[in-house]
Amino acid sequence: MIGDIKAVFHRSIEGKIKTVTVSKNKSNQYYAAILFDNGIDKPQVNTEGKAIGIDLGLSHFVITSDGSKFDNPRWIKKHERNLKIKQQQLSRKQKGSNNKNKSRLKVARIHNKIANCRSDFQHKLSRRIVNENQVIVVENLAVANMVKNHKLSKAISQVGWGQFCTMLKYKAEQEGKVYQEVDRFFPSSKTCNVCLNQVGSLPLEVRFWNCANCGAKNIDRDLNAAKNIRDEGLRILTSELGEVSSPKARASLTSGTGDQACRQTVRRSNRGRKKSTTTLVSG
């Protein structure tokens, strides 16, 4: 029996409540996840709108096919010094003492702060991308395999690619938009987006490269990958007719090096709070 707990509702409940799940985190904070039916039918999937490809990275968290780059906030690095001090204090406390428990709560609050900052950033960025685009294409990354690289494991673990893709997917489905994944083995970085020529090897330290086939120079590795991911996603949608809602939409989808699914009818949303996801580079 936990007794009465004051609750803060961040949105009103409209509909029939199905289930309520109460959870408690390591910082002794309680959360209630409420599942309710609002009676609104799920919107029909439609491909008529702007298509965008997304390449996920470490130096830049998101690189889009239209030339936008969003910086990786690196939340753990910002709180690393404070976290180190609190963990050192925790290690010196006597096991089983009240001071040990108090020190443990201080460490837990820092971890909770990092998780909340990461989640807030990803929620705002995913909402912005879904609002501005109709077809969203990302790469299906094997994060569990990537963290086996001991040089990049810490950076990959803290960035939260999987959580971000999950947010993109369910928000796109709620809006009747298309979320498409391409195979992780698709050579998005090594393929020239202009002539589709594929180079044999492209190490991670090479950020810009020249195409020997068509003569394209200073190809941005990440931007090129985002464009190829977009085009591959459109090719998949074109071949899988079941994913396309109408003959008109099927005719509008492009493949190869196409720029968009059809006319750009999705506008920027000016509603809600001020954006905290600032664009560093725009193309």
Image (spheres, rainbow, N blue to C red):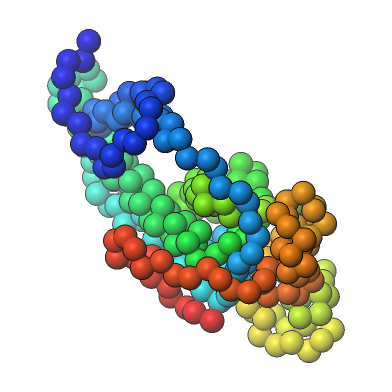
Residue 256 position by quadrant:
bottom right
Q: From the image, which quarter does the N terminus lie in?
A: top left
Say left or right for 182 vs 126. Answer: right
Does residue 150 appear anywhere in the picture?
A: no
Identify which residue is drawn at 60% across, 59% down.
136
How many discs mark residues in the rendered view?
0
Front-lying residue, 42 or 2: 42
Residue 67 vs 38, above or below: the answer is below
Residue 20, position as x, y percentages in the image: 36, 23
Residue 8 vs 282, above or below: the answer is above
Identify which residue is drawn at 24% across, 49% down.
82
Say left or right for 142 vs 113. Answer: right
Residue 214 position by quadrant:
bottom right
Residue 73, position as x, y percentages in the image: 39, 61
Q: From the image, which quarter does the C terminus lie in?
A: bottom right
Identify which residue is drawn at 43% across, 73% down.
279
Does residue 180 appear anywhere in the picture?
A: yes
Front-lying residue, 223 or 271: 271
Residue 126, position as x, y percentages in the image: 47, 56
Single out the residue that lies furthest toward the top.
Answer: 1
Front-lying residue, 55 or 97: 55
Identify which residue is drawn at 16% across, 19% down.
4
Residue 92 position by quadrant:
top left
Residue 280, position as x, y percentages in the image: 43, 75
